[in-house]
């Protein structure tokens, strides 16, 4: 099915297409159509001090082909032009096979900060000697995760040179599988802290997940034929735009904001923690010591445009808001998501499509002109 004209349909017509493609029941269709899926009682159970709910448009990004699978991607966001531009980026990708995405697995980091240790180097070795016992203790906090093949896979010990003197920081490396994992990481870090105190004679202070999920990276790449991009001079303009972003944190920040325009709406639509994603992605963007664009663009030997993204992406499809919010469940169903890693790959690909869509506008007609063209067409 070609969704190119999705933009010109009414919300009801669009919903009919989504219902058919995603096999939604009439009840599920009604939940989306009525626009107030989250009852007050549920909202009140989610966070403290609730007085109501707040609604934001729920849209669909079309044209996504990722690892040969076709997706309709739910997007929750308030910014005009973003969804239309992303569909344009995805169409450019689709014309040449779509996105190819991969990941490094779903290992999260839980940190335990140990203070008051005058012999950090021998403490580090003592902790490593007790690695098995520490991992076993961590695993005892989540037998269900263990039964799914997850759990603590390793530990690492870092010695920080803080302004208060040396600090020993233990990292629990835990495969959280289809869970985002913040809760289980906190629980495991708390569980092992007394043992770490006993081993080192130090005092455990913070015990908490790290949102810099460097062992949970997701990657996506795309190739756009130069003919589909208006020819090689326009490919070169994108390379120049990328060189600008790579050389200048002011431009890199805006570039990455545009990438977030794609990623965050999908995370919201699926009930994921957008702040965890944002903090992780921005930290990863500056891991070299300078803030960099999270997307890279280059030209292959044919003169075609190749783009890629690599970011940490800690998202889940079980537990938390994903489980409680009816729209989050429906979003996963619409995308036919099978695993958290698949969702992470979709999110990264949508981020790359957002960057591509914007770069196409910026290097051709300009954002303002494109905005008028796209937004006025949507009914
Ligand atoms: C606007 O929300 C995002 C852009 O400024 C991103 C960019 O300039 O790359 C269009």
Image: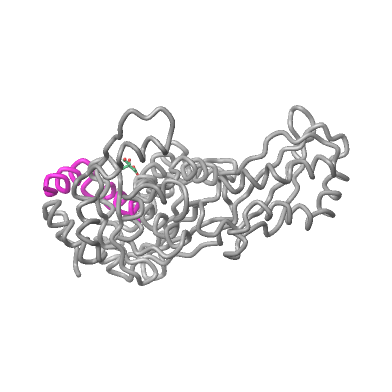
Query: Which residue is found at the position 73% from the left and 46% from the top?
Result: 192
Count the numbered circles shown: 0
93 magenta-colored = no
375 magenta-colored = yes
- Nearest the eye: 24 or 379: 24
User: Where is residue 378 drawn, in percent x and y?
Assistant: 14, 48
- Range shown magenta: 353-379
Horizontal side of 125 relative to 158 (left or right) equals right
- Residue 345's place in the image compared with 213, above or below, is below
User: Where is residue 222 drawn, in percent x and y?
Assistant: 38, 64
Horizontal side of 58 relative to 171 (left or right) equals left
Horizontal side of 210 relative to 274 (left or right) equals right
Q: Which quarter of the rendered image does ligand 1 occupy?
A: top left
Query: Which residue is found at the position 88% from the left and 38% from the top?
Result: 119
**In what quadrant of the picture does the N terminus appear?**
bottom left
Query: Which residue is found at the position 53% from the left and 56% from the top?
Result: 217
């Amino acid at each position: 099915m070609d969704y190119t004209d999705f933009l010109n349909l009414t919300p009801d017509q669009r919903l009919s297409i989504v219902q058919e493609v995603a096999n939604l029941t009439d009840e599920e269709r009604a939940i989306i159509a009525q626009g107030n899926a989250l009852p007050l009682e549920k909202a009140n159970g989610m966070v403290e001090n609730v007085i109501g709910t707040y609604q934001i448009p729920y849209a669909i990004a079309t044209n996504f082909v990722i690892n040969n699978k076709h997706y309709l991607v739910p997007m929750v966001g308030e910014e005009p032009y973003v969804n239309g531009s992303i569909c344009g980026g995805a169409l450019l990708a689709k014309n040449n096979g779509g996105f190819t995405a991969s990941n490094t697995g779903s290992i999260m980091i839980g940190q335990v900060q140990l203070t008051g240790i005058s012999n950090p180097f021998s403490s580090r070795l003592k902790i490593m000697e007790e690695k098995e016992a520490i991992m076993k203790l961590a695993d005892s906090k989540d037998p269900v995760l263990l039964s799914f093949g997850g759990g603590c896979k390793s530990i690492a010990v870092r010695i920080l040179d803080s302004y208060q003197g040396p600090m020993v920081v233990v990292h629990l490396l835990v495969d959280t599988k289809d869970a985002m994992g913040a809760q289980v990481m906190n629980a495991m870090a708390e569980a092992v802290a007394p043992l770490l105190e006993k081993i080192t004679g130090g005092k455990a202070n913070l015990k908490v997940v790290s949102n810099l999920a460097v062992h949970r990276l997701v990657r996506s790449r795309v190739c756009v034929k130069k003919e589909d991009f208006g020819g090689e001079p326009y490919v070169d303009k994108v390379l120049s735009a990328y060189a600008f972003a790579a050389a200048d944190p002011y431009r890199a920040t805006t570039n990455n904001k545009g990438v977030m325009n794609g990623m965050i709406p999908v995370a919201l639509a699926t009930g994921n923690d957008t702040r965890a994603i944002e903090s992780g992605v921005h930290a990863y963007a500056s891991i070299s010591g300078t803030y960099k664009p999270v997307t890279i663009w280059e030209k292959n030997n044919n003169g075609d445009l190749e783009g890629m993204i690599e970011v940490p992406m800690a998202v889940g499809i079980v537990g938390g808001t994903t489980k409680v919010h009816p729209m989050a469940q429906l979003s996963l169903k619409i995308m036919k998501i099978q695993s958290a890693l698949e969702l992470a790959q979709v999110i990264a690909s949508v981020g790359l499509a957002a960057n591509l869509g914007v770069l196409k506008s910026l290097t051709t007609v300009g954002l303002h002109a494109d905005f008028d063209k796209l937004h006025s067409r949507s009914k």
